[in-house]
Image (cartoon, grey):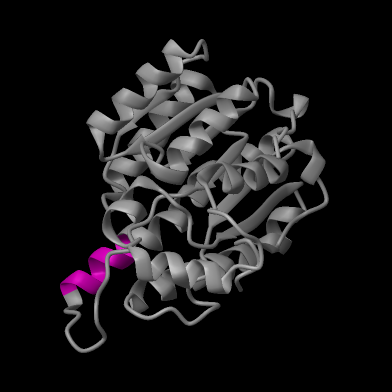
Amino acid sequence: MERKWASYPSLSGKRVFITGGATGIGAELVAAFLRQRAQVAFVDIARDDAEALCARMRASGLQAPLFRCCDLTDLAALEATINDVVVQIGDIDVLVNNAANDQRHALETLKPAEWDRLVAINQRPMFYTCQAVVPAMRRRGGGAIINMGSIGWHIKSAGYPAYAMAKAAASGLTRGLARELGRDNVRINTVAPGWVMTERQLALWVDAAAEEEIRRNQCLPGRLMPADVAALVLFLAADDGAMCTGQEFIVDAGWA
C-alpha cells in the first residue's frame, strides 16, 4: 500500500535544532523538516556522515541544513554551538533532542567512567539544550521541544541498563517541565520509538533471531523505519499538535 505523508504549512520557515542529526533517525528528521520548508540546524560528532547528508539534501533540491560538529558531552561547546546557530538562523522554534548511544553494557562490569560517559551522551544534553532554547521560546510566545525516548525500558529490554535509565529520564524531563513551560505556550513531549531499522541497528544488532523477535512482538507487520518516527515528531512540532504537551507518544508498531 502506497503511503502518503502529511504536509504541515505551520512548519514552513520555523527554525529547528536537532541533536545527533547525521545518521539514522536524526538524518531522517533533518530531511523531514527540510521537506516541510523549515530552517534546520543539526549537531553531531560524525562529520563525514553529516557532510554527506548535507550534500544529499542539496542534490535533492532541498535547502541545505546548517551543520555544526559538536561533542554533546562538552557542555561549554554545546552552549557555544547553540549560540552560533542562533546567530546564523535566529531563535530556535523547535528543539529535537535525538542524540543517543545504545552501546551494550552489563550491570556487573560497567565502570563509573563509562557510566558517566553514557549519561553525558544520553541524558545530560537534553536538559541543557532545553535550558539554552527556552528563554527565547518564552520571549517569542511559544515553541516545541521533542525528547526522544525509547520503548526499551517499557518492555524491560536487557543489555543496556544505563541507556534504559536515560531514556526513562527523557519522559521524566518532559513531565517535569511541561507545567512551567506551558504557561508560556512552550510544548514539550517525548517520542518513544520501538526497534527502528537504522543503519546502526542493522549493522550491529539485527540478525535472524532479532527479526523473529520483532515479528513476534510487533502487532503490525513490517519494519519500523526512521520515517515513521519522523512523521510523529513533525506532528508534535507543528501547530497540529498545539494542545499536546507533557506526554509520551509511542511509535513501535504495537510492541510496548
Q: Residue at x 51, y 10 (%)?
A: 61
- Which residue occupies the foreground of this view, 234 or 155? 155
The secondary structure that most of the magenta stretch takes on is helix
Q: Quadrant of the N terminus?
A: top right
Q: Residue at x 46, y 48 (%)?
A: 129
Can residue 42 be seen from the camera position used here?
yes
Looking at the image, residue 15 lies above or below residue 227: above
Left or right of 38? Residue 45 is left
Span of residues in magenta: 113-120
Q: How many marks?
A: 0
Q: Quadrant of residue 151?
A: bottom right
Residue 61 among those drawn in magenta: no
Can residue 91 be seen from the camera position used here?
no
Looking at the image, residue 219 lies above or below residue 69: below
Q: Quadrant of the C terminus?
A: bottom right
Query: Where in the figure is residue 154, as x and y percent of width and height?
Result: 55, 77
Left or right of 44? Residue 235 is right
Q: Residue furthest bottom?
A: 108
Q: Residue at x 51, y 29 (%)?
A: 31
Query: Where in the figure is residue 4, as x and y percent of width and height?
Result: 73, 32
Q: Residue at x 58, y 30 (%)?
A: 33
Query: Where in the figure is residue 137, as x and y percent of width and height?
Result: 64, 39
Looking at the image, residue 126 lies above or below residue 156: above
- Which residue occupies the foreground of this view, 60 or 36? 60
Residue 117 among those drawn in magenta: yes
Query: Where in the figure is residue 183, as x and y percent of width and height?
Result: 77, 54
